[in-house]
Image (spheres, rainbow, N blue to C red):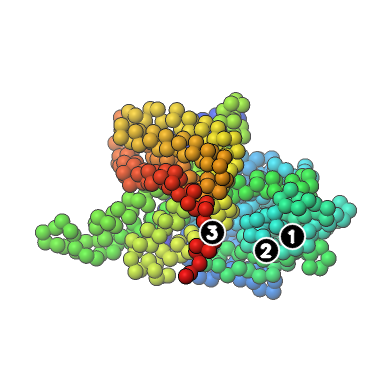
Amino acid sequence: MSYTAPTRDLAFACSELADLEGVSQLPGFEDATADMLEAILEEAGKFGSEVLAPINHSGDQQGARLENGQAVTADGWKPAYQQFIESGWNGLPFSPDYGGQGLPWLIATAVNEIWHASNMAFALCPLLTQGAIEAILAHGSPQQQQDYLSKLVSGEWTGTMNLTESQAGSDLSAVKTRAKPNGDHYLLSGQKIYITYGDHDLTENIVHLVLARLPDAPEGVKGISLFIVPKFLREEDGSWTRRNDVETLSLEKKLGIHASPTAVLGYGNNGGAVGYLVGEENQGLMYMFTMMNVARHSVGVQGYALADRAYQQAVQFASDRTQGRAIDSPTGERVSIIDHPDVQRLLWVQKCRNESLRSLGLVTAACMDKAERHPEAETRKAAEEIVEVMTPIVKGYSTEIGLENVSLALQVHGGMGFIEETGAAQHYRDQRITPIYEGTTGIQAMDLLGRKLLRDGGQMTGRVIDYIRQDSIEFTTLSKDMAASLQTGLDLLSTAIKDLVAAAGKDIRIPAAVAEPNLRLWGVVVCGWQMAKAAHRSKILIEQGASDAFYTNKIRTAEFYFSSEMPRMIYLAETIRKSGELVSETEAEVFQVA
């Protein structure tokens, strides 16, 4: 179960596809050069392969546990986490004002892939902390930023996101946790479930960001406020040692990510948990979306990161496993299964998908940097719109395809993949959560449909398509077939937008019924955009004298993507055009067993 970070492919995607050079010209990012990226990826690769990957399987087998009301992490977790924060990894994309490294999200995203691929259960902890930092940076008061950010950025404290309740699920309008004003703070009471790293023994304090309702709050999502609720409160002497009224009631027993403590937290069972309002009353959902959008992009990274880990293991297993005879050999000598055409097809599918998803995740991260820092307002707006459209695709499509890829990696192992000792089963179990948490694929699809497409009659999504067309004009010099296929895909997206907008005018259930195929259509096409661009850049580098097989393989991988994956856009477009009305007219009784 060894892991090798794909540092060269990460560097290629950052430099040649995601415009690292342009990002390095943004104010404050002048040090983000190709040389720095290479050095960071090399060190991150070592940490991932030498520290995190070796405890991945043992952590899964041992799991987190609850002892006397305290969550205890698996063996090796505490020293690994201490090394992680001492090396400064936790603060990579955050301001030096709070002790961070001040690097762009583009580089941080490349590094985050390494963490999630080497040990997803471990990497979930800094993922949630990053989201908490973003929320407090964007919406916290100066005092709150002073109290919490330095500790969170360094990783001395961790952060959580507390949304879900048993009766509410993803429907946050049904949240019942209450917050009662009490002097300069509030007292919270209620229960939250599925809280990733809601309790653990890695740090001295945990900063919970909790959605709750004030006594006079309006019903629904308009009545939700956001509160900072630390596990330990500050004493008069400045130490954070007074236990807050937050109790770990249990740890969830999960299909996968066993080493990640997922807590059920009780607030206010002994009088009220002290919390501090973030921003204004009843604006909590909007504030929490700051945290959720960071987390959604990061979970998309998880989707292709773990798929790449599983792919690497499948390649190694296929190389080592001798079984069957060569189909084209007159003597029929026994061969490794990697020589069998169908196994090669399974590996090709995984390879082209993983590389396309990686590129899309990194391009989106670069646009996050440009949306925040580019000096020209027009460029900032264009980048922001790309982030708006791509975030649900990165989250939804990367996790769905990542799950398919992990299943294919298990298939390469045959029966051995179904046996826990090989580790292939763990990857599948761990990956299965990614299309579910931080908003299911259906929720991402409805976000893309409702908030990004129907809201303005398809204008913003149309502008993103125009941007991709403009960016891909030069690809015609690579392959007429590839360029024509990409243009067909963009045309299908444009047609789907018009059809969905028109259908919404008749019955909103019709476009909602095909929201998920719409998201998949976007995923297929924009990943094709990235693969064509990768092939185009590789061809240029070869013409400039690069004789490395890496670039030749890039072109071959793109060719396989366009022959194997791109044709799916046809049936997805047909699904969007034809099945929405049928589904929208469905009555629940049709699904009952006769």
Q: Which residue in the structure is indicated by mark 2?
A: 167
Relative placement, left or right, of 285 versus 511 is right
| Residue at the farthest left position | 330
Task: Name the element at disc 3.
Answer: loop
Measured as percent of width and height from the top left, residue 115 is found at 51, 53
Give above or below for 94 relative to 468. Answer: below
Quick one: label 3, few (<14), some, or many (20+) residues within 10 Å?
few
Query: Which residue is painted at 68% across and 54% down in the image?
Result: 172
Q: Nearer the viewer, mark 2 or mark 3?
A: 3
Can I make out residue 333 in this image? yes
Name the mark on residue 337. Answer: none
Q: CA distance from mark 2 to mark 3?
A: 24 Å
Give the mark, 1 or 2, whose residue is nearer the N terminus: 2
Measured as percent of width and height from the top left, residue 393 is found at 51, 45
**Amino acid type indicated by mark 2:** Gln
Q: CA distance from mark 1 to mark 2?
A: 9 Å
| Residue sitting nearer the eye, 107 or 402 | 402
Q: Which residue in the structure is indicated by mark 1?
A: 176
Q: CA distance from mark 1 to mark 3?
A: 31 Å
Query: Which residue is painted at 35% across and 33% down in the image?
Result: 483
Can I make out residue 244 in this image? no
Query: Which residue is painted at 40% across and 55% down in the image?
Result: 405
**Amino acid type indicated by mark 1:** Lys
Question: Would you identify the image quadrant in which residue 171 lies?
Answer: bottom right
